[in-house]
Amino acid sequence: MVKHLVAAQNEFFATQKTKEVSYRKYHLKKLRQEILDQEDAICNALYADFKKPKFESLATETQLVLAELKHAIKNVRSWSEPQSVGASLSNFPSKDWIQPEPYGKVLIISPWNYPFMLAIAPLVGALAAGNTAILKPSEFSPHTSKMIAQIIQKVFPPEYVTVVEGGVEVSTQLLKEKWEYIFFTGSTRVGKIVYQSAAEHLTPVTLELSGKNPCIVDETASVKLAAKRIAWGKFINAGQTCIAPDYILVHKSIKDSLVDHLKQNITQFYGEEMETSGNFARIATTKHYQELKAMLASQKILFGGNFIDDEQYISPTLVDEPQLDSPIMNGEIFGPILPIISFEDENELKEYISKYPNPLAFYVFSSNKKFQKRLMGQYSFGGGTINDVVVHISNKDLPFGGVGQSGIGGYHGKFTFDLFSHHKSVTKRGTWLDVPLRYAPYNIPLKWVKKIKHLF
């Protein structure tokens, strides 16, 4: 089946149909309308998969996708136009431009934590750029995966866009095929497998991976506001957010105050009986639920630490001063567990942060502008926010992506269009003048040749 779908998309792309901007806009508009029509059904599917609250489904899934679609529909024609650049004097007379063109058929593999948004948002840019696409949603969010398949089937002919559902064996089959571009969102471990498969055909990739994201709170921070914003960003989607704060590094002098305010805000958000709250999601997979439970073994719990196995529920949990070699600090947590570690000076802070590879996100709460600037410049990370968390993802004019172990490439808005486009360079020479200096035999003095650099 996979080979048949790939062959069909190859044939369709060869017709040049997707290079017509009007064709792209027509289908992007159809996709947007279908998502609007099915928005409630999408939210229901997300709830069926892991009890995602409808507010979160709207705010972090469907509305973000609809915003991407609106932006792409409005701008796809201008994005697709050749971009003039200054010509080199050495080529006079000439005109130069950059022409964006689609790669061809692309493969998009999406994860289970934001199963709708992280499947459709990259697809929007891939189609705006003129590619065909095969989309592989996560098997761990089956209701949302089925919903995506129904939407795509209704909007697109399969030779243009299609969904392939299934588990690891399906992903393995897909990765054996030759693609013009692969976009993967998921774990670093699986990202390495995708990268190795892509290397077989020298296929360009975007890898949106993960990282152990630090959240630094110094003694000058507004503790009350910091606690409120951190609690929101950490526990939305039950902590299953790749850019959520993974651990807090708080100045020793304000640690107790921060912990108290975190407790107050968590209780205010989700109530005294949090397991009954309709505002808190569940852990999406059984395997990850068991891993999260195991992380808390032998840890000092400051708050929370409650489980309901048959619901895969873990309450918002604060952990006090874990050992750096413990499982909870060895990799990304990706759940509603927040370690809190105190520090006294920047040297100690550096020891903690430098222990881990480049994070996907980096957060600093401070009123000290020099401290803010110093940390933002000192450390390498995918993206960050000062005095808040997560919100940098909402700006379509900021590229979202990792660096080093946390990923390759960035997208959102026009950045997604550019990601899925090859930008080819074109020079058009005039024919009314042809300076003979470049042709053999070379009779000009060599010292003149050394002046040529001024013509470029």
Image (cartoon, rainbow, N blue to C red):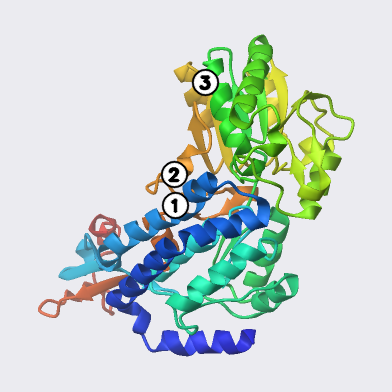
Q: Amino acid at mark 3?
A: Leu
Give the vertical position of 232 relative to 448 (above or below): above
Instruction: Provide residue 37's location: percent of width, then percent of height.
Output: 42, 64
* Residue 130 numbered mark, or none: none
Residue bearing mark 1: 64
Q: CA distance from mark 1 to mark 3?
A: 25 Å
Residues at discs 1 and 2 in contact (Cβ within 8 Å): yes
Look at the numbered disc 1 and give the secondary structure of its residue.
helix
Residue furthest to the top: 253
Earlier sequence position, callout 1 versus callout 3: 1
Instruction: Write down the residue under mark 3.
Output: 225
- 423 left or right, relative to 47: left
Which residue is nearer to you in this view: 205 or 168? 168
Amino acid residing under circle 1: Leu
Residue wearing tag 2:
394
- Quadrant assignment, res 265: top right
